[in-house]
Amino acid sequence: MIRLQDITKVYPMGKRELTVLNGVTINIEKGELVAIMGPSGSGKSTMLNLLGCLDQPTSGSYYLEDREVSHLSSGELAMVRSQKIGFVFQTFNLLPRISALANVELGMRYAGGVDRQRAMEALDRVGLSDRANHHPTELSGGEMQRVAIARALVKNPPLVLADEPTGNLDSVSGEEIMSILTSLHTEQDITLVMITHEADIAHHCQRIIYLKDGQVISEETE
Amino acid sequence: MKKWVEPVSTAWAGITSHKLRSFLTILGIVIGVAAVISLMSIGKGAQADIMARIGSLGSDLVTISRGSSSFRGFRSAAGSAQTLTQEDAEAIAEQVAYVDLVAPIYSKSLQLVVGGENMNSAVTGVPPEYREIRHLEIGYGAFFSDYEYQRGAKVIVLGSEVKETLFGDTDPIGQQIRMGNNIVRVIGVMESKGATFGSPDNSILIPLTAMQQMVAQPRTAQGERVISSISLKVGDEEQASYVTEEITSLLRTRHRLGPNIDDDFRVRSMQEISESLTATTELMTKFLGAVAAIALLVGGIGVMNIMLVSVLERTREIGIRKALGATERDIWGQFLIEAVFLTFTGGIIGVVVGWVVSAVVDRMEIMTTVVTAGVVILAVSVSVGIGLFFGFYPAWNASRLNPIEALRSE
C-alpha cells in the first residue's frame, strides 16, 4: 500500500537548511492500522503531509498503491488526494457556514461528484444522521470530529490519514472517536495512519512507529 | 448533477455567507453600470433630438447672412455689413448649379398696432418660394400666392407663437393689423416647429414686394437693393458643400473682395451645421461615457479589493478544499465565478436602475433620453469583463496557496 524509500525532507531556513526527515524507509500494508508517535519536532507532521500528498520529499521515493507519486505535478497530486486519501485533522477543519451534511458532501465534491444519499449514509455510520442540518458551531467537539470522519470516509478512500484526531477532545470523546475509527477500519478495509502523542490512543493500533529527529528509531507491533 | 451546478452553488454560498459585503460590492458595480446607461442615454437622446430638429428644418437648406464689414483693418459686428443684395440672390439663382430655389429676405423691425396695443416686432419680407425652402407648414389659412407677391399684396402669415401673443385664442384669419403706416391682413398661421434655431414660430412673414412699398430699402453704392439674408434650397444634398463653395467665390467676385480680405458674408449649409452638431453631441456622449466608465472602473477595483480580502479570510477553507482534492483550477474557478457572479448581478441591476433613471429624466422632460440595446449589451458585458479582469488576480492568488500553510492559518 505505502512504500517509503529513503525519504528526506529539507527546508531552507535562510542560509542554513533544516533537515526534518532524514532517510525514512517504511512499508505499510493494505488494511493496516498504524500510529506514528514521537516528540514535537520529530518530523511526524511532515511525514503525514508527505503521505497525504500535500507535500513532496526532497529526495527518496514514495510509492502509493505501487505508483510513484513523489514527482507528480500539483494537479496530479490533487487528483491523488481526491481519489485515494481521506484526512482527519486535529482541529476538525469543517467549513463553519455550511451544515454537517454539506460538509460531508464536500468530501465528494472533488472526487467525482456529490451524492446526498451516500453523504447521509456516512453520517449515519458515525451516528449523526439526526444532526445532518446542524452547523458545526452547534455541535460538540466529538460530534464535529465525527462529521470530519464521515467527510473523510464518504468517498471510500483506500488510505485515511489522521493528524492527532483526539488531540482537541476530552478523554471520553477521544475514546469514542477511536472506537469509531477502529470499527470503520475493520468494516471498510481501509488503511489508517494516525499521528498521536497519547500512548493509550496509540495502543488501539496494530503497529506503532516511533520517530525522533527525522528518523525511525523503533517500531512495535501489538 | 451537471458539471457547472456545483461550482456555481459553491460561489453562491460564498456570496450569501457575507450578505452585506456582497451587497456593497454589487452596489459599486450597480452605480457604475447605471451611470453608463443613464449618461449614455442622455447623450444619445440629445443626438436624436438634434437630428429630429434638423430634419424638420430641412437638411437641404443653405443660408447666407451678412458678415462683418471691415474698414482699414477694423472689423465691426457680424451682420453689420450692408453688402448682401437682391441682385446677389438673382446671380446665385442664375449661375450656381444644384440650386433649386432662392429666396432673398429683408427683415426690419416695425411698429404694430393690434386692437389697442402697440408693439415693435421684426417683420420679414420674403418671396413665396420661402415656404418650400424652409419647409413651412400652414396650420390654417394660406400662404401668399405668386399673384399676391407680384402685385405686392399687404397680407401677412404669422408664426404660431406670434399669433398666440397677438390674438390669443381668437381666429386671426382676415383680421387687420396696422403695420407702420399701412394696414395689413392676416391670411395664414404656420404650424409650430418647436424651439430651434431659425424657428419660424416667432416670425411675421409678408411678401417682399409689399415690404419694399412700405419701407425704404437701402441701396449700396452700386445701386443694388440691400437685403438681410438669403435662403436657398439645394437640389441635391450631396452637393451642399460644392454649392457653398461656388456661392462664396461668386459673392467674393460680386463684392470685389481682394485676395487678402475676409468674406463680408457667411454661407452655412444645414448639412454642415448638422455635421458639426452631431460631432459635438458625439463628443459629449463619449465624454459622459468616459465619466461613467471611471465609476465602473472604481466599482471593479472594489470587487478586486473584496475578492482579495475574501481569499485572505478563507485561506483555511482553501486549504481544506485542497486537502480534499481540489485542483488549482477548481479553486481558481470558484473565486472567479464568485467575482463574475457579483459583477454580472451588479450589471443586470445597474441596467434596470439606469433604465429607470433615464426613463424618469425623459418623463420629467428634463432631457430626451434614448436607451439603445447596444449600450445595454456593452454595459453588461463590460461588467462581466470587469469581474473576469479584477477577479483574476485574487483567484489566481487563492489557487496558488500552499495547502499545508493554508491549513495552518487561523
Image (spheres, coloured by chain):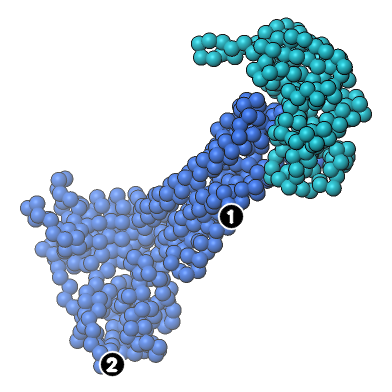
Chain colours: A cyan, B blue
Residues B400 and B160: in front is B400
Q: Is residue B138 above or below residue A6?
A: below
What residue is pinned by disc 1?
Answer: B349
Asked which secondary structure carries label 2, the reply is: loop
Q: Amino acid at mark 1?
A: Ile
Q: Is residue B135 visible?
A: yes
Q: Residue at x 10, y 63 (%)?
A: B221
Residue A204 percent coordinates (x, y): 85, 24
Q: Amino acid at mark 2?
A: Gly
Looking at this rendering, what residue extends furthest in the right direction? A187
State the image quarter where residue B100 is shown. bottom left
Chain bearing tag 1 is: B
Image-based side of B338 in relation to B6, left or right: left
| Dot 2 or dot 1, earlier in sequence | 2
Counting other residues with Cα less than 10 Å from the Cα at mark 2, is it few (<14), some (14-19), or many (20 or more)? few
Residues B130 and A128: in front is A128
Image-based side of B252 in relation to B134, left or right: left
What residue is pinned by disc 2?
Answer: B115
Q: Nearer the viewer, mark 2 or mark 1?
A: 1
Looking at this rendering, what residue extends furthest in the bottom direction? B116
Residue A34 percent coordinates (x, y): 82, 19
